[in-house]
Image (tube, rainbow, N blue to C red):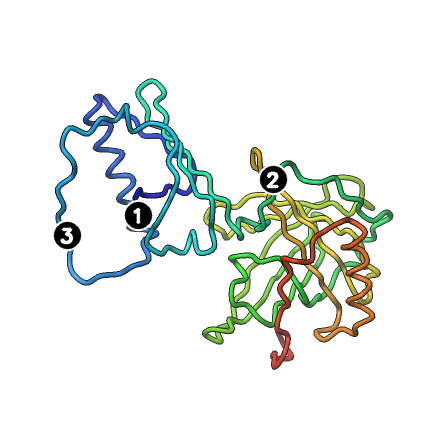
Amino acid sequence: MYIKVGALTGVRGRSSSDMFGKIILALSALAWASAQIPNLGFCPEYIPMANFNRQRFMGIWYEAERYFQLSEVVSRCVMSNYTKEKNMLRIFVIVIIANAAMAQVPFLGTCPNLEAMQNFELERYLGKWYEVERYFAWFEFGGKCVTANYSLNENASVKILNKQISSLTGVATSIEGIARLIGRSDDPKLTVTFPSLPLPFDAPYWVLDTDYISYAVIWSCTNLGVLNVRNVWILTREPKPSVAVVEKAYQIIDKNNISRAYFIRTDQKNCPVTN
């Protein structure tokens, strides 16, 4: 068993023992923040192994078993690579996870070069959209009645207001984001960021196709080394679109060789009118 660090962590120290002590302290703090198995009382005292050889511990380790934690709720192929660079122990963890940042489904290789629509009209795209289907994403876990409302800011950026209701608790939540065109005004490729997140970042947001009045197909893909992570959304103007409308979206998805296997249907039943 090892403690997983969710990204790249470097710890420096004045000596080998001091450095390793700081590593333990940092990992303990991270574990405390993300631990998912609560127990009453203080942490039990365990005796660590004697004569630990840090040099022999270096290299790649594969996660075989773990306690449950939310950050790895649907993860697989988890491995860690420990290397020593000067006076720093570097821990790099690779997690192939079926949910991540904005794009959540992992694939080997780089992002495919998809053909987005031409002559995109941003102003016609604005307004309220209902999420009908999506790839799995942790930030929408258990979400129903998911909507996205787009409006134009004074600086020509787009304000995003995403809303959903938890099917587990019934609590309504919302988050605001900002989208910006990355090319010409008629280019359907945007970047999206959510400033309120702990680590906001720009994520791709491509409108593969839309007729503005009934459906839109949104694509997001990010390269992560030897992997790429993807997300796809089918949005409609009505919460319960006709079969014909959804079929139009499927045609765009099939045209771009996007797998339908990862789609999850969004529950839009019994939703408040004001959502």
Q: Is residue 15 above or below residue 174?
A: above
Mark 3 → mark 2, Cα distance in angstroms: 41 Å
Locate residue 175, reporting x and y percent.
Answer: 55, 60
Q: Amino acid at mark 3?
A: Pro
Residue drawn at (61%, 68%) of the image: 146
- Direction front: furthest residue: 64
Tag 3–tag 1 contact (CB < 8 Å): no
Q: Amino acid at mark 2?
A: Leu
Mark 1: give few (<14), some (14-19) or many (20+) Cα within 10 Å: some
Q: Is residue 261 above or below residue 12?
A: below
**Label drawn at residue 31:** 1
- Quadrant in the picture for the N terminus: top left
Which of the two labelled residues, at mark 1 and mark 2, occupies the earlier sequence position?
1
Mark 3: give few (<14), some (14-19) or many (20+) Cα within 10 Å: few
Judging by the rendered image, the residue that carries numbered circle 3 is 44
**Label drawn at residue 162:** none
- Direction bottom: furthest residue: 270
Residue drawn at (71%, 54%) of the image: 218
Label 2 SS: strand
Q: Nearer the viewer, mark 3 or mark 2?
A: 2
Label 3 SS: loop
Which of the two labelled residues, at mark 3 and mark 2, occupies the earlier sequence position?
3
Judging by the rendered image, the residue that carries numbered circle 2 is 108
Locate residue 114, reporting x and y percent.
Answer: 76, 43
Q: Say which of 202 and 22 sits in front.
A: 22
Locate residue 219, reporting x and y percent.
Answer: 70, 50
